Amino acid sequence: MKLTQHPFPFSFLLPALFLFTACEKGKLEEEAPAENEWIYNTMEQHYLWYDDIPDRKQLDFKLSPQQFFASLLSEKDGNEDAHGRRHVFSYIERKPFATKALSETSPVYGFEYAVFSVEHSGIYYAEVLYVLPDSPAEEAGLKRGDWITGIGENHISLNDYISLDTGNGVTYQLSRYDPQRGLVSNGSVDIPPARLVRDYPILKDTVLRIGGKAVGYLMYNTFTSGPGNRDETYDEQLKEAFRRFKTAQVTDFVLDMRYNGGGLLNSARLLASMLAPSDVFGKVFTRMVFNDKNRWQDHTTSFFNAVAMSSYNLNLSRLYVLTGTSTASSSEAVINGLIPYIGRENMTLIGERTIGKTVGSNTFGEDNDYGWLLHPITLRISNADEQSDYTKGFAPDIEMEELIPGQILHPFGDPQELLLSCALQEITGQTALRSTESVPAPSLLPSLRLVGLSIENK
C-alpha cells in the first residue's frame, strides 16, 4: 500500500510526460482506445470519487493515456500547499519508468534543490537542500546550503533548472551567503556524469547530548523498504538506527520529515512502532476505508508486536516533528496514527504546514500488457479514533520557514540548523520562536522569489 504524493505538481515538468518520438506517438494513438477503455473501467470500479467521473459520452477515448486519465479526475483529488501550488494525488506512469525512487532507475547527479527566480531577469538560482550518499554530487563535494548560480559560464535559465540534476557531467558556478556581502562567489564544482543513485531514506541519525538530555535526531526522507520491490534493506537500516537510539537511552526525539512526501505504509507503521509508547503494541495504527463498491477491502493496520519491537522501541511520551510544505501522505499518517497514543498536545510540530493528504492509492496494471501503471486514490485513511481532520495539512505549533534568501542552511543534525535548533530550545526549556522567523533579504541580495522544490517532482 502506497501513500505517496503526486510526482508532478509543477506545470513546468508536465511536458516531460509527452516527449515521445513521432513513431512512438503514432503507436500510442493506435493503442489509446484499448488502453483508455481499461483505464476507464479501472477508475469506475476503484477510484474513491468515481461518482465525479464525467459521463462516458462526454469523454474522448482517443486522447493519450495521460490526457485521458487526467480527464477522469475529480476536483477533490489534490489540494494546494502553503505556497498556493496545486498537488494532484492520482497519477499514471509508463511501466519502464515506474519507480520507488526516480533516482534508482534514471541517471541523476544525486541532489535536491530549491529554485529561486531573480526578479525581472529570466535568471534562476538553485539552493542545494541535500545531497544523496554515494552520488556524483557527493563525490564532487556539493553540499547542503550551496547556491548554484551558473552552469559553465552561463546563467541558469528556465530550461536549465528543470533538468539541473541530470546530464553527462557539468560545471556549476557556486556562491555562498555572507551576512555582510550577500551572495559571493565560492568557486566552481565539476559534477561527474549522472548515474543510478540509491534514494536512501535516512540522511542523518545522531544523538545530541545537550543540557543533560540525550536527544535522538533522525532525518527520514522517504518511506521505502529497500532498493527492490521486496527488499527490506532500508527498513533494517531504520531498525538499526533505533537500536542505537535505544542503547544511547535517548530521553527526547526529533523526527525530521520536512521533505518526506510519503511512500510505503508498512515502513510508516514500522517507524511509528519504534517511536510509540510501549503499550500500543498490536493496537490500531490506521484504518482504511474504500469506496462503496469495495467496502469488502476496508481494514486496519496495527502497530508491530512487543517481541518484534523489543530492541528498537523508544517508549516516547513526547515527540518533536520537523515539517515542511513537502511533508505528506505516510509522513502525515505517522503523525496522525500516533495522536491517539501520545496525544496531540505532546507532539510539537516545527516548520511549515504539511500537504494534507488523508487518502491513499493502489497500483493497477502490473499484470497486464498495456504498458502503464495507474495510481488512483482508492481509500481514505484515519487513525484509531477514526480521525483524519487534516485535509488542509497539519499546522505547525512553531512556524518557521527555512527557504528565505539569507537564511543559511546548516547540515542536518547540526544544533545550529534552524528547525533543529528550535526543537532543542523547546526540549531544554529555553524560549523558542513562536512565529515565522523574520530574515529580511539584505539589499546586497537580488530580489529572489521561491519557485519550487525539486523534491516535489519525484
Image: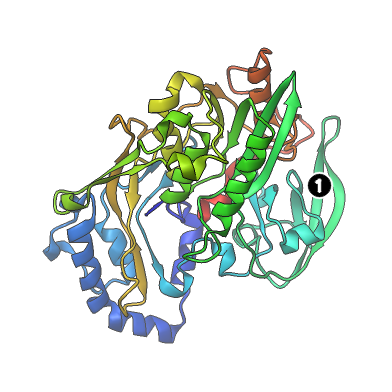
Q: Is residue 5 left or right of residue 244?
A: left
The kind of residue on which mark 1 rests is Ser
Residue 327 visible to an observer of this rendering: no
Give the quadrant of the N terminus: bottom left
- How far across and down, in percent of the image, does residue 44 sit? 18, 60
- How far across and down, in percent of the image, does residue 447 sit? 68, 37
Categorize mark 1 by other alpha carbons within 10 Å: few (<14), some (14-19), many (20+). Answer: many
Q: Please state the total of marks drawn on the protein image.
A: 1
- How far across and down, in percent of the image, does residue 410 sit? 75, 37
Nearer to the camera, 147 or 158: 147
Q: Residue at x 13, y 64 (%)?
A: 56
Residue 89 visible to an observer of this rendering: yes
Which quadrant holds residue 58? bottom left
Q: Residue at x 44, y 70 (%)?
A: 18
425 lies above or below 77: above
Q: Residue at x 53, y 31 (%)?
A: 352
- How far across and down, in percent of the image, does residue 39 sit? 25, 67
3 lies above or below 211: below
Mark 1 = which residue? 175
